[in-house]
Image: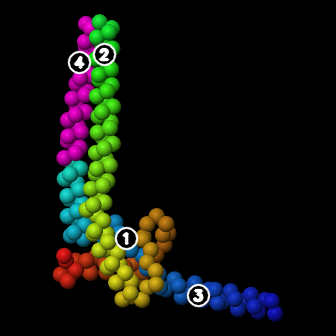
Amino acid sequence: MKWRCLLFCGGVMVSAVSHAAATIGVVNIQKIVQSSSEGKKIQGDLEKELNKKKKELQSKESGLQEEQKDLEKKKSVLSDEAFGKKQDDFRKQMVQFQDLVSKSQMEMQKRQQELLGPFLDQVKKIVSRVAEEKGLSLVLEDAPNVIFANKASDVTDDVIKTLESPKTKR
């Protein structure tokens, strides 16, 4: 009797898992950002801003490197006191530069969130709509945590098509 109950319960569980697996979909958000026209535009805008910041920082870094070389050259000419003062000034400039780099990184992360946030909100709505149309009860992001997903359960291309359709354009 116990074995029959265990077999029945096990069969019900397998049936429930099989049924649940048939209603789970996956979506690759990174592919949507990289493949959709709006995602490409956002990435291009971010890249332009990032390159501008990089050039600014590289210019400041080059200036500091030149200043460090000059300081080393003048070491033998300057008194210990004067050299120490210049060295302290240089250290302060380096700290300011490191602060500027950190601040720039945070600004770029904030800017990325500002640009991608509304787009990703739109993508989530479309994912929900596609999931409902396909009768999916759950959609997971196809990220490192998804080890295997059947190609039929991937709704990424459907989301991109919907996103690119004239009806969806803002």
Cα gap from disc 1 to disc 3, whole angstroms = 26 Å
Q: Residue at x 23, y 18 (%)?
A: 70
Density class for disc 3 (Cα within 10 Å; few <14, some 14-19, many ≥20) is: few
**Which amino acid, by three-letter code, is at mark 3?**
Ala
**Which amino acid, by three-letter code, is at mark 1?**
Asn
Residues drawn in magenta: 52-78
Q: Residue at x 29, y 39 (%)?
A: 100
- Quadrant where the C terminus is found in the figure: bottom left
Residue that carries the numbered disc 1 in the rendered image = 28
Cα gap from disc 2 to disc 4, whole angstroms = 14 Å
Q: Is residue 66 magenta?
A: yes
Q: Nearer the viewer, residue 54 or 3?
A: 54
Tell me residue 98's x, y (percent): 32, 36
Cα gap from disc 1 to disc 2, whole angstroms = 55 Å
Q: Residue at x 35, y 75 (%)?
A: 124
In contact (CB < 8 Å): disc 2 and disc 3: no
Relative to 52, 68 lies left or right: right
Density class for disc 4 (Cα within 10 Å; few <14, some 14-19, many ≥20) is: few
Residue that carries the numbered disc 4 in the rendered image = 70
**Which amino acid, by three-letter code, is at mark 4?**
Asp
Cα gap from disc 3 to disc 4, whole angstroms = 74 Å
The total of numbered circles placed on residues is 4
Residue that carries the numbered disc 3 in the rendered image = 16
Q: Nearer the viewer, residue 67 or 82?
A: 82
